[in-house]
Image: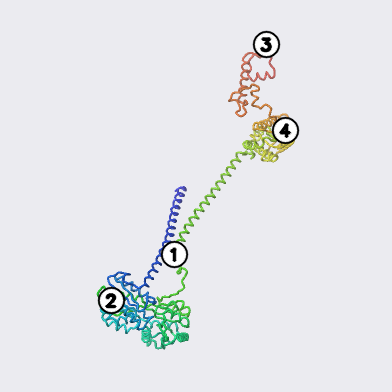
Amino acid sequence: MTDTSYKAKSRGWGRRMKFLLVFFALFLVVSGFAQILYSSRRNASEKEERDAQVTVYDTGSFSGSHHALFLSSYSPTFPTYMDQITGLNQSLYANDMDYDAEYLNTKNYPDDANRDLNYQTLKYRLANHDPYDVILAGDDAALSFVERYRNELFKNIPVVFFAVNDRKHARRAVRNPLTTGSIEEQYLQDTIVLAQKLLPESRKVVEIVDDTKTGMGDQISMRTVMPMFPNLSFEFLNLSQLSLSQFKEKVASYDDSVILIYASAFEDADGRHYAIPEMVNILNSCVRVPVFRNSSVGIGSGITGGKIYNMTEAARIAGEQAARIVNDGIKPSAIPLYTKSMGTYIFDDQMLEKYDLDKSLLPEGTVLVNMPKSFFRTYRKVLIPALFIAIGLLIFLILLIDVYSRQVLFARKLASSEQELRESGIRAQHAAEHDALTGMKNRYALEKDYPALLNQETAILFFDVDNFKFFNDMYGHASGDEVLKSFGSILVSHFGEAHSYRYGGDEFLAVLTERSEEECRTMAQDCIAALRHLDMDDVVVHPASSCGYALGVPASRTDFTEMIRQADVSAFDAKIEDKTHVSGGSFDPKKIAPEKLVSHFGIKAPQDQSDPVTGLPNIAFFIATAEDLLKNVIDYTKRPAWGCGRNPGPNEVINRRRSRTCIPTKND
């Protein structure tokens, strides 16, 4: 592969790689924006779903083949309500069932008046609604309400309950062949066991309860697990028997020897009611030890943690049981009471840090809430698409830098090429205007310089090396070149490089301004003397030079050329007549120019025997004329014109004419 083809192939691959990089960068940027758009829409969808789940579900929200009624013991604001709704949605909707929800609100209104009001409301609504295929009861209060009014409101309708704390109540309920469900496992035993590990100095378990139905169930559950911990003492802190101030004082007195468990505290001795978030805030204001809980409500807001009943899973299983009864025709009595574990350890990381509890003691799979989020986890939804966009933009930036670098490199190369071109032009111009041997300016440079000399006092000094051909033939061309270079250096040193020219062959010019005739003669004599004293090895005969000069004010190119000619003629005169080898004078523009001499004397030469520049007869004219003259002389000798008795040859004739040795005859 040739170098040219390799470079062409490399450029082709480079263009393909750039195209791929641009495509990849566009893909990253578009993907980043798509992820941002998807995340924003997903967040909006999740928010809409949460908002929708808070609302009361009716038959218009989803149209299924069968209809269920969900009786909640509490209200939509109760902390576990959303978990229950999520589980029911997962199971009922998947089995082509819809449901309505009614709220008994027994946490806020546990009295008989609220119970009677709920009865009247449901009686009216059920009378004006199509019969339901199944009843879902959430928590103990809802199950009690269904059992109380089964014959009046829910006669012959299957019932599925979940999240019931009271095991005895749950087992009694399933004796009815139309009832089944699951128990809300308290996981008190597992919570106490883990609390003992976290608090090795603990000696007592204190459970916060009240006299509500839920609180009574919590007390029963605790009494069930007491025999399993013989090394611990147990105590109930009953809010219903204390004022709020007494309750807070009691809680504040507990130290690390106490395992404090918050079960239920909805009503104090003064009849004031407290929601779980409110009670959590009260505990946080006075407690000095970790607070454990076997319910997820409050964990993350100040409760340390515990093993939690999975309310979403419980609701999902209840929905699956209801679907089996309605869709598959399975009798409730054929579905046993669900008692399998649905618990998960959940702890607040901030509370573990606050009370210096050993996290390594937590069981595998424990869910930690309020963990310090890393920067990436906090802004993950933004960082990932932003990273895509940043990488894409970075690729674009690299490509732009590459393009810019190439443009800069191209501009530099172009500038370098232009500089080289200018320098080449300067060198070429210098070579055109300077003599290669001596380095002096030449005729071409003189052609450029002479316009600046017009109309001012100018002196032209014409130097000619004497007998240069003889010197060149005797000592060789190398010595002749050395003489020319040396003489050029002498002239440059005397007149300056700008005023010195090699006119041609062994002829040199010096062009000066504003100089007197005396100054010109002196400078010329100095140059000639310097040449005479030139020191050259193996040279016996030293070179000499003659100079002719012309002073005047040239007004045109013709005048300037004529001044050079006059200086040239003066140099010839100086060779013969002037002992100083310097001759010249003032320039007279009225003097007959050489091209006019031809017509003045009537001399006419053919075009091929005339100088193309001056128009004067050239050497060819004189040779032809001499040959004609010589021919005539030879023709005369053919006759006996010399009286010597024979016809001599041409050389002999010429010699005799010069020596006059022969006497002409009378016929001459």
**Which residue position holds label 4?**
582
Mark 4–mark 3 CB contact (< 8 Å): no
Q: Do the CB atoms of the residues marked 1 and 2 lie less than 8 Å apart?
A: no
Q: Residues under labels 4 and 3: Cα distance?
A: 53 Å
Q: Secondary structure at mark 1?
A: helix
Give the mark nearest the N terminus, 1 or 2: 2
- Dot 1 corresponds to which residue? 384
Q: CA distance from mark 4 to mark 2?
A: 149 Å
Residue type at the position of mark 1? Ile
First reached walking from the N terminus: tag 3 or tag 2: 2
| Mark closer to the chain start, 4 or 3 | 4
Q: Which residue is mark 3?
A: 666
Left or right, 328 with respect to 388, comes to: left
Mark 2 lies on residue:
127
Give percent across and percent down for residue 447. 63, 36
Badge 4 density bin: few <14, some 14–19, many ≥20, Cα 10 Å: many
Quadrant position of residue 614: top right
Q: Earlier in the sequence, mark 1 or mark 3?
A: 1
Dot 3, crowdedness within 10 Å: few (<14), some or many (≥20)? few
The quadrant in which residue 272 appears is bottom left
Q: Residue at x 62, y 36 (%)?
A: 444
